[in-house]
Image (cartoon, coloured by chain):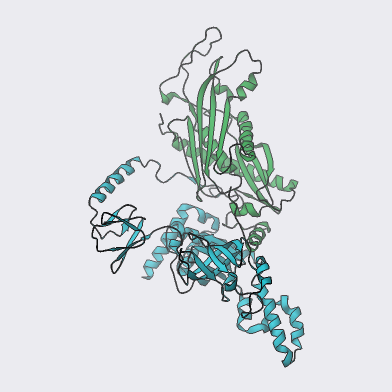
Amino acid sequence: MTEIISIRKPLNPDADSDVESSDEEMLEASLAPKNNNQSIVTPGELITEDPIWMRGHGTYYLDERTYSSVAGTISKVNKLLSVLPLRGRYQPETGDHVVGRITEVGPKRWKVDIGARQDAVLMLGSVNLPGGVLRRKSESDELQMRNFLKEGDLLNAEVQSIFQDGSASLHTRSLKYGKLRNGYFVKVPSSLIIRQKNHLHELPGSITIIIGVNGYIWISKTLYQKSLSSTTGNNALDSTVSSAGAKGNSYTPGQGSVSITRLEEESSWEIYSDKNEPISVATKDTIARYANCVKALAKCDIGITETRIVAAYEASMVYENAGLLLDEETMRSIGEDVLNRERMRG
Amino acid sequence: MFKIALSPAERSYLHESLSCSSPIRPDARLYKQFRPLEATCSFLPGSNGSARIRMADGAECLASVKAKVVSLQLNNADATQQLQNLIEVDLDINGIRDDSNLSSTIASSLKGSLVKHVPLDKLRLTHRYAFKLFIDIVVLSHSSVYPLTLLSLATYMALKSTKLPLLTSTVDDREIEEQPMFSDDWESSIALFGDSSLSPPLLFVVAVVNDNIFIDPSPEEESVSENGICLTYANGKIISPLQTISLSPKDNTGINAAQILKAHALVKEIGPLVTKSLDEIVSDDSVKTIF
């Protein structure tokens, strides 16, 4: 039974001989650095001696020569030379769909950990509050900010703007943003996430996934009722508000508008609920499997997209016990499988 | 120690999936399945035995065993006490003060169980001299509240790979005092646990959620667990210390006999498998020459 524990030896236990040779190679490389075709540079590596280039992010210069300050790929836009780091903290950009965790509740704002250098800011004015969209933020809202979002809460949001110091300001002014429930959180390096039009996907097995651009991923159960109620209006509300809706059943056209706003108010509170819907064992199993697939893709340094996650999920079906996916060799084989499928498709 | 903040929804999701009758761990492991490990041993040049063990999440532990010749005081009547002093455990957990309650408790309980399970007669060189073992354990980084499992796995491997030089001078020095001399040949060294029926103890931490128990809990699982049990396993048996530990700061409930029995049975089942796979690594690495 190798299922209980898997211990393997480090991949390069005696790297002594390799280190020497790579040192020599590096020496050679530094002697002949003029090869601008090589796309990957390391910190301190000479990029160019030509002074016409403008120096962008990830570079520094000494004596008219431009060096790289990070490990990454060279990018040239007109005369601007910059190095895009391979790894590193997430750099927010306006419009990014991110997943974050509240770290601090402050005056009229929440601090949100989005994996960037600084915590992002979510202003009280940039969230949807219960009781309709067009509502002024009152002092009582300021006092009960912890009733909406508190430390540790997960939410998905959009980057509204970037401050001068590079920190982000978020907003959740849309139905698709807000507090997260009914699922499980996975973190991967943000460099693996490819910016796309849509970061919220529905996956086979009635799973919804939010691939935050910052590498924070939320895998949850798909809620059909919720989307139904939001599209068809307030008629199809669930049992929690049906007691309030009982009045509305016998409403007259004059009173109708009142009861509808009242219902809206109650359903709006739901967006800040901490209670999960009932989730079946099978769904939880699927969520765990998807989480392991995401980790496997991250382990293989494969960019994470919806199609690749689905491909990895399908490839993982070979293993009945999804816990086996934690094994490094299994992760590699899944990664290879995903890449092979992509190649086959062309 | 790391505090992980979970939202109430995540917490209830995790707790619910761990506490139902067919529990699902967040990483889909079986209740008796460990996270994958990476281990090597006999790699520190200056020590008699050493081991390094890593987890995929970056948790890492190093253990080293060094032997030093010490003279025994002959006039002292309490010989067993003296023999017990032949093992010294020093523990350093990153992020936790050396004199903190946690690390001193772990160190003393580790020492207590090691004394019983290290062949002390092999440490005794002559009437006057003996080897003293200095066991240094460094937990470089860890994410769990009690890095005990990691720590004891590393200690086990370090002790199993420990080799002591062969004594060439006379064994009997009752009459004439003589400095012990050792063979230069490392090939002829004796493995501390070579032909011994004893084996170093292993400590396992299991998390308790409702009626379910889980081996090797991840930080998330720890934070939603109601209780933790630390069990010691050696030579196919569960031995003392067996203690409850609190893995999460809140909602600790009492523990019942059924949970302890379950944990007992679990460790008894997995113990041989864990020792077997650790021994494989040790025997693989034992061919390496250090000195």
Instruction: Say left or right for B235 vs A258.
Output: left
Which one is in front, A10 or B274?
A10
Observer able to see residue A214 = yes
Residue B16 is situated, as x and y percent measured from the top left of the image, at 67, 60
> In the rendered image, what is the letter of the chain coloured green?
B
Compared to residue A155, the image places residue A12 above or below, namely above
Instruction: Say left or right for A51 vs A196.
Output: left
Instruction: Say left or right for A59 vs A146.
Output: left
Furthest residue in direction bottom, as rendered: A253
The residue sitting at 73% across, 79% down in the picture is A242
> In the rendered image, what is the letter of the chain coloured cyan?
A
The residue sitting at 32% across, 58% down in the picture is A40
Furthest residue in direction top, as rendered: B175
Observer able to see residue A278 = no
Residue A145 is situated, as x and y percent measured from the top left of the image, at 65, 67
Compared to residue A261, the image places residue A343 above or below, namely above
Q: In which quarter of the image is the C terminus of chain A?
A: bottom left
Compared to residue A29, the image places residue A259 above or below, namely below
Residue B115 is situated, as x and y percent measured from the top left of the image, at 61, 29
Residue B267 is situated, as x and y percent measured from the top left of the image, at 63, 43
Which one is in front, A181 or A323?
A181
